[in-house]
Image (cartoon, grey):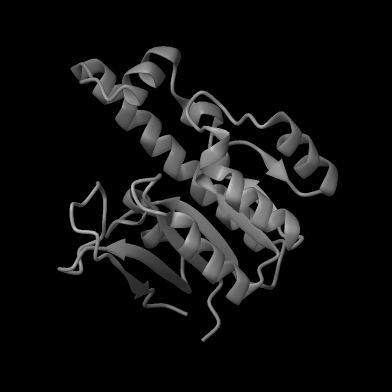
Amino acid sequence: MNFSFIFIGSTHGFIDDFQKQKEIIELTKPEFVLCEELEDFKLDSKDKFDELLKKSKISNMTSFNEVEEIIRLCYKNHIKLIGIDFHNFGFNEGLQKKIKSQEELTKEEEEELNKITKLREEYHLSKILEYKKKTSRPIVILVGCWHLREKSLLREKVNNYKVILPCNKEGKPLFSPDEDKNLSYMEIVSNEY
């Protein structure tokens, strides 16, 4: 079956997300890979890849080593790699510091985070739909597992997709670190084609 979109859930580093990403990208051979962690970078030319690889800096929220492997894979395979998020995920300096150090948020900060998260998901969706118009090939989309939860905006508003999520031995998607190292992947296919 040919899917328009292949979502791969990212754990943002508490497991090795890259191996599954590499497997799917090499199997699919997309023209575009859309990546939440690339934030607002658009690597659609050799020069842009070269510039970012030389600079080795993404943002305060994403370290270069978190995305280096996916950048190099797409570069090597001549795949355009497009960030589909806001710079620093749209967080102000105070939120950035607290999120990075995993400090408890105030009620106001929690409300602000929820508001930004909603805007981010709407932006993810708009970028996904924008790039679908630019290719007839499947698009691989790398976003945090949480954005692919049941009833999420992406799963509600996009058709003809496959979601690939890391899961624990009970078959539950990983939204946080799991002590069990016997992880596997589950696939969810949209109902409409």
Give coordinates of residue 183: x percent, y percent. 27, 65
Left or right for 106, reference 146: left
Instruction: Give how far across and how far down residue 142 sits, in percent.
Output: 50, 54
Residue 83 lies, in percent from the top left, at 60, 44
Query: Left or right of 136: which side holds 121?
Result: left
| Residue 80, picture quadrant | bottom right
The structure residue drawn at horizontal position 45% and vertical position 38%, both measured from the top left corner, is: 120
Residue projecting furthest to the top: 94
Residue 67 % position (x, y): 56, 44
- 131 shown above or below 171: above
From this view, report whether residue 173 is shown above or below residue 94: below
Residue ranking furthest to the left: 170
Where, by quadrant of the figure, is residue 157 drawn? bottom left
Q: Residue furthest front?
A: 181
Q: Nearer the viewer, residue 12 or 69?
A: 69
For image coordinates 32% across by 62% down, the residue present is 166
